[in-house]
Amino acid sequence: GAVVSQHPSWVICKSGTSVKIECRSLDFQATTMFWYRQFPKQSLMLMATSNEGSKATYEQGVEKDKFLINHASLTLSTLTVTSAHPEDSSFYICSALEGGSSALETQYFGPGTRLLVL
Amino acid sequence: GNSVTQMEGPVTLSEEAFLTINCTYTATGYPSLFWYVQYPGEGLQLLLKATKADDKGSNKGFEATYRKETTSFHLEKGSVQVSDSAVYFCALSALYNFNKFYFGSGTKLNVKP
């Protein structure tokens, strides 16, 4: 089946630094990718929808300047947490929608990236 | 608004026991409902889905029925195996934006031999 990878799987950084997380669709093209955030024992919350070649669409309450999303190719989207602070510590999950499909079930999820900001 | 509530875990069962994980939802209109499973170190995988009231989704021995009257989509399996140990997420998709998910908080299932 389709595989989505994320890198790194976990990262620890100092407060004030920026962290980049990559999401790749390994064997299919993804015109649309999604970024989620999950707090311990809580739901996954959609942060933004990333469309290849255009600006990301952010959900209400998500700071665009804080969470920079770039979808430069059909297989790669990146999430950069700028000037990270301890409250940004979380589990970030991406998913990729197979190109040309609008069906919900063809959304494939990455394994997630755990970010810890000290 | 849209939201999903599922039972807290972890749920610990012995092999061959009966499994129920409760899921209820709040939604505008008639959403599609899903169960996703996440095995350790892997991404979420679609387990089953139902797109309208009274539909039953099934896969790998798991079943869930879309109950509009009780706004529920409980996951069941008659005989669990150790390999079913994972985290299970209930989710709905918004009627007007099918790519937008609303997830429950996940329920961890531990199956002991």
Image (cartoon, coloured by chain):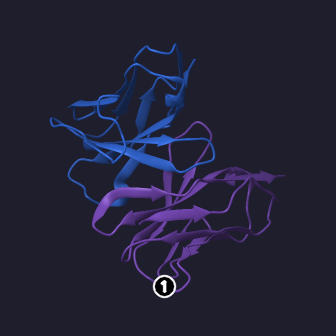
The x and y percentages for residue A82 are: 37, 21
Which residue is at 61% across, 63% downward? B6
Above or below, comparing residue B110 to residue A111 in the picture: below
* Residue identifier under label 1: B54
Question: Amino acid type of disc 1?
Answer: Asp
Task: Categorize mark 1 by other alpha carbons within 10 Å: few (<14), some (14-19), many (20+).
Answer: some
The purple-tinted chain is: B
Q: Residue at x 34, y 35 (%)?
A: A63
* Residue A51 horizontal side relative to residue A109, left or right: left
Against B105, residue B95 (above or below) is below
Q: Residue at x 58, y 53 (%)?
A: B105
Residue B35 pos. (x, y %): 52, 62
Quarter of the image that includes the N terminus of chain B: bottom left
Can residue A1 be seen here? The reply is no
- The hue of chain A in the figure is blue
Residue B32 screen position, x and y as percent: 40, 70
